[in-house]
Image (cartoon, rainbow, N blue to C red):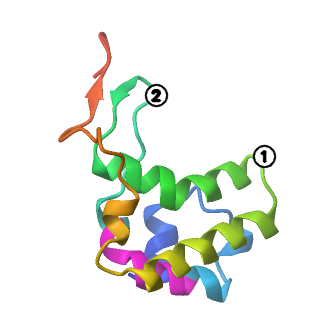
Amino acid sequence: MTVQELCTRFPEIPPDLHAEPLLARFAETCGDLLQIAHKPSACSTEHDAGNHFYLKLIGPMDIYRYGLSTRHKVLTQIQDLLDQHQADPNGFAASLLPADTAGKEIKGPGCE
């Protein structure tokens, strides 16, 4: 995945990160997981793998977008994810998933 594809797929990534070389490495390294990542519904009661990938990989940038984190902190979090991937490429995806990951996202009553 290219950084342009990443930013198109997840418009919540703040524009000031788009030209960041670290984000380009992140897109390339985590592209397979980012392809299946999706934001959980507000009324989700159980998260599937795509939800967890979103929360771990994109979530920090979304929090930064709301001004609840700093640019430095989010770049450090991205670097940490890249370091974790490099240390264990085969186990990286599994490390992002808790043991109780649902097979499919479950939404609460009254949600579609």
Q: Do the residues labelled 1 and 2 touch (CB within 8 Å)?
A: no
Give above or below for 68 relative to 96.
above
Q: Where is residue 110 in the image (x, y as percent from the top left)?
A: 31, 10
Q: Which of marks 1 and 2 is nearer the N terminus?
A: 2
Q: Kindly indicate the quadrant of the structure image that contains residue 39.
A: top left
Is residue 24 placed above or below 96 in the rendered structure? below
Would residue 44 appear left or right of 74 to someone viewing this image?
A: left
**Relative vertical location of residue 4 with respect to residue 34 in this rendering, above or below:** below
Q: Residues within 10 Å of mark 2 (few under 14, many from 20)?
A: few
Q: Nearer the viewer, residue 51 or 12?
A: 51
Element at badge 1? loop
- Residue 16 magenta-drawn? no
Total numbered labels placed on residues in the image: 2
For mark 2, give the secondary structure: loop
Q: Quadrant of the C terminus?
A: top left
Rendered image: mark on residue 109: none
Q: Quadrant of the N terminus?
A: bottom left
Residue at (72%, 54%) from the top-left corner? 64
Query: Is 38 located above or below residue 27 in the figure?
Result: above
99 vs 72, nearest the viewer: 99
Image location of residue 97, percent across then percent down: 35, 52
Residue 38 x/y as whole percent? 37, 51
Q: Farthest residue in the left direction?
A: 103
Q: Residue at x 68, y 83 (%)?
A: 20
Q: Name the residue under label 2.
A: 42
Which stretch is magenta? 24-33
- How far across and down, in percent of the image, does residue 66 sit? 74, 46
Q: Is residue 26 magenta?
A: yes
Residue found at x 37% / y 27%: 44
Q: Find disc 1 in the rendering and name its residue.
A: 68
Q: Please state if 90 lies on the left or on the right of 6 as rendered.
A: left
Residue found at x 50% / y 55%: 56
